Structure formats: C-alpha cells, structure tokens
Image (spheres, coloured by chain):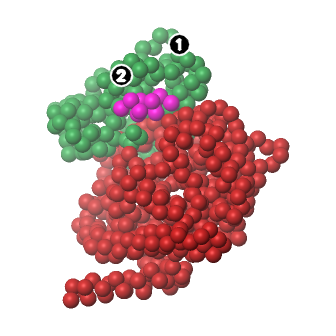
Amino acid sequence: MLLFLLGIPLILILTIVVIPASLNISFGVRDCYVNTLRKIFECSRMLSENDTNKKKFSLDDMLSFAACGMQAIVDDEITKCFSAEELPSWNLLTRTNKNYEYISLRLTILWIIGWCIRYLIFLPVRITILSLGLLWLCLATTLIGFLPKSSLQTKLNHYAYLIAFRVLARAISASIRVHNRENRAKGGGICVANHTSPIDVLILSTDNCYAMVGQIHGGFLGTVQRILSSSQSHVWFERSEMRDRMTVTNRLKEHVEDHSLDPMLIFPEGKLLFILLYFILNLSCCTCINNTSVFMFKKGSFEIGGTIHPAAIKYDPTFGDAFWNSSRESWVQYLVMMLTSWAIVCDVWYLPPRKMEENETATEFANRVKAEIAEKGGLVDLVWDGQLKRVAAKASLKYAEQEKYSEILLKD
Amino acid sequence: MGSNSSLILRPEEIAAIQKETHFSPSQIQRLHSRFSTLDKRNTGSLTREEFMRIPELAINPLGDRIIESFFWDSTNNGAEPSINFRQFMRTLALFRPCKPNEKPQAIEEIREQKLKYAFKMYDLDHDGKISRHELLDILHMMVGTNISDEQLGCIADRAIVEADTDEDGCISFDEFKKALEKVDVEQKMSIRFLH
C-alpha cells in the first residue's frame, strides 16, 4: 500500500516532467506558470505600495538618503556584482527586499500561501526530480564509461549528458530562452560565459555538451565531478596545480587541440566575471584585480589558441535569484534556495565565434569579447584596469530623486 | 593602484583600524582598495572633490551633507581639507550593521552613535540644536523645487512641534532621540559591506 502511494507521484513525475524533459519537449506549462506569477507579483506590488506610501515627514527620512550615499562610497564595481539585486516588486520570497513580509496582513497571508506551495509542494517534487536526474547521470555515465572509446560511446554520452541536465534543469523550474543557437560552441572551441551563479553550467548544459574546466571539489560536488569524468573528458585541476601556470596551459591546450573532444566551458571557481578568460588570455591584466585567487598569477601573457565562443547569460531575478553569496550561504543552503524558488528564468545568447586577430594583443581580445558579452546580456561592462571611465553625473538624475521623495510626502 | 608604497596598508595599521571600527581585516583591505581608487591624486587622502566624483553620490540629494560628514573631525589648516584612510573608516563604521550576536548593551551604544551622526547631519552649526532653519535646509535638499516653501515650512513646523518637548523652538539631541525612539535606526543606517 505504502509502495503504491509513493509510486503514484513518482510515476506522475516521470511521465509529466522527466520524460518530456529528456526528449526536450515543452508543453508551455512553464511559460504559462511564469506569466501567472508575473501577474501575482504585480498585484502584490500594488498592495504593498498602497500600504507603504501613506506617510508624512519624519526626522529619519534623511537616513535612507544617507545610507544610499554611503553605499555608493563603499561600493566599487566589483562589490555591485556580488550583491543580490533589489527588486522593484517583491516576489514573495523572503530573501529579497528585506522585511517585506511584515508590511501588511494581506501580503503576509499571500506570503504564507506562497511559502506552503514552495516548501510543501515544490520542494519534495523538485528533490525527487533532482534525485532522478542525478541517478540517471550517475548510472548512464558510469555504464557508458565501460564502453570502449568509439564514436558510439561519444554519441551515447551526448544524449545521456543532455538528458541528465535537462531533467536537472526542471528541478529548479528553469525556463531558458536560447537565442542564436547556430553559434553554439563546437569541438576545439572554448565557450566563455559570464558567471553569476553555480547553476550557469547547468543552464548551458541543457543545450550543448561541454567539457568542464574547474577545480576539484570535495564532497558532493567532487563526486559529481568524478562521475562526469568517467565517460567524458573534463579538465579538473587540483588546487595546487592551479598555481602552476604551465600545467594549466598545457592541459587546456591539449584539450583544445583535440577537435573530437567537446568544447570547453570555462566555469571559473571564483565569482568574478571573466577571471578565467583573463587568466587564459592574458595574465598581466589579472594582477590588478583585487582578488586573491588571481593574485598568485605572475605577469606574462600567453594564449591557448582555439576559437572562443562567447555566451551571455542573463537571469530574471523576479522569480528567484540565482546569485550565490558564498560568504553567507553554504552550498546546501543555496541548493535549498534554488529548489524553493518560484522558477529560474533566464536568457542565453550565443555570440558569433571569435578568434584573436593578428594585430591584437591578448588583453585587447579579452576586452573585446567581454564587451560583446556584456552588451548582449545587458550587463555592466566592467573595466578592470582601475581606470574607471566616469561620466559627469547628470543634474537631472538628482531632480528625479527629489521628485520621488516629494511625491511620497505630498500623498499625505 | 598601489604604486606608491606609502599607500599600502601595514599589518599594524589593519589591527589598529580593526580594533577601532570592528571591520574584519578583509573588509579593511577591500575598503582600502576602494579608498585608493577614489584617491585620484594618489596622495593617500580624499578631498571633497574626489568624493563628488562618485556619480551616485553626486546625484544624491544629500550628497553634500554626506561628504561633509567625513570632514567633521578634520582640522582645517589652510590647505584644502582632506581625510586619510583612518578617518574614512571611522565614518563608515557608523554604517556597519550590528552583528547578530551583539550584546544588548553594545547595540544600545551603536544606536546612540548612529543617532548622534544623524543629528549632526541636521545640526549644521554644531550648536547641539536643530533649528527650524536647519531642518528646512535639509528638507529643501531632499525635495528640491517640487514642494512650495509654504508647504515645506508647514512640514518643518509640524515636525518641530511634535518633537520639541521643552518648547524652545528647536530640537535638542535628547528630543531627537525621543522622536526616533520607535525607528529602527540600526537597520536604516546599516549598509552592506562585503566580507
């Protein structure tokens, strides 16, 4: 009886989620769900506005201006990348827009309902999907690993890989829009993407097979890494090896030169955008980034060749923030956060492949690629060399701030 | 950055700043690199003009006052006033969030310090009182030309009447404290510092 009770949801999940996911079929349910959520958030925003905007002047009003100003003083471009975005409308998750759940009774009730759905329905279902995906990944890759190296093995591995990641992506209700699929990375190439969160690799892997580059982890992540390596060639480095420039270069070079292997996906360990891109293309410009993981590389530039396939990923934080603040949350906490988010909605753009031009230095090339990715993804292009190009602030922006505050006061 | 050796932080400096401001060493390092970036002239100190170059600060209606707050303690010895990293950190420390395990007594102290800072933001002439004129000054900065002077005057008068318990027409620090009794100043005056 118990087995029967447990069996039904499992079969449901298998037929509704896992099988369509592995065949890459979408019934449009997720799009519908995302649109519905958008409407609900809009309503909740109106509710909270009605409840907060009625106020009169208080002596502490200036404190928010002061805090804003102080934040601008301490925030450098890098700091801004590290912090989760504040949303214009609250998405009924606790982690953004602090203390929103206490604004009004109506909002609180809405939040509680949302909490129940997320933790009591989504979480168990998603954990099941996640386990099924991981189980598949382990089984398939281990079994395929036993096959002799052949084109059949590679082909099978491709399917197994794609299926596994598509199923895993459903576990976080990822709704991914892919643009310019014709530019996907091919063998002998390097896919370089901007890096915001650990699930970047998952997002990209639902669409193409990649050889991953990264540092060997311990624990759960390490096990996944080992399993992945059994049937596909990935480039994992020991922490000590990462310090040795020559080893890193040679290993990467070897991989890129073999066109039968999957394109490499540069998936940097740190969260700073493009560190690894810089590190591969030009080490001299890395030394100025104030981050310990880059500091250990000495000056000198080299390249590993191959074609660069840039990809831009942009998340829509309305439904769940994919950002991982590793100083605050552990890996497991982050996983739970992802599994209890409404959805992960993102756009992926593949950009045309790029090669270094003859009269171009590695730095220039890196900057060119970086700027292209930033432009496509609507991200801020950061100039890492410390010469931040500042434009004179417009007075009109200040008026806009004053107007905003006046409106709040005059509502009284 | 950091080409001038005198601008590099020494371990004992970090320790001293840590003791005074309770920032962690890595936070101090990070803020120091921010300080160096802002320090366009590479002198190891910041002037008002260098602060003004931060775009978000330049458009902040209270930008001038915020910058001014860094210079409260600096002595003006003829030359253009500037602050060093130590002074910079001292002011920033006022916006450090409370640690979750802070003792009630310490929280009370932090609150007091934050309130003092807020009070001084109003009290332009440092006479320990916020006059109607001083209050109007800040109000004016915050709303620009969007609210008429009469309306603004009403708002200021009402705020003073509400806070002014001894009816001297000004708000003293004690009255200010009382008026903000129910306000979560600790949270409002906390900003995010990376670890």
Circle 1: residue type: Ala
Task: Check whether the beta carbons of the residues at disc 2 and disc 1 lie within 8 A of each other.
Answer: no
Q: Residue A58 placed where, x, y %?
A: 29, 45
Going 29% across and 34% down the picture, which residue do you hit? B114
Q: Residue A93 placed where, x, y %?
A: 34, 63
Magenta stretch prevailing secondary structure: helix
Residue A96 visible, this angle: no
Rendered-image quadrant of the C terminus of chain B: top left
Q: Residue A408 placed where, x, y %?
A: 38, 54
Magenta region:
B24-33
Circle 2: residue type: Ala
State the image quarter where residue A300 is shown.
top right
Does the magenta-highlighted stretch encompass residue B28?
A: yes
Look at the image and give the colour of chain A: red
Total number of numbered labels?
Answer: 2
In-front residue for pair A151/A290: A151
Q: Are marks 2 and 1 on the same chain?
A: yes
**Mark toward the start of the polypeptide (2 vs 1):** 2
Look at the image and give the colour of chain B: green
Going 37% across and 41% down the picture, which residue do you hit? B191
Rendered-image quadrant of the N terminus of chain B: top right
The answer to whether B37 is drawn above or below residue A181 in the figure is above
- Extreme-top residue of the structure: B77
Instruction: Name the side, left or right, on which A403 lies relative to B131.
Output: right
Gap in Å between the C-alphas at discs 2 and 1? 30 Å
2 or 1: mark nearer the eye: 2
Residue A182 visible, this angle: yes
In-front residue for pair A189/A411: A189
Residue at image mark 2: B15
Going 41% across and 33% down the picture, which residue do you hit? B26
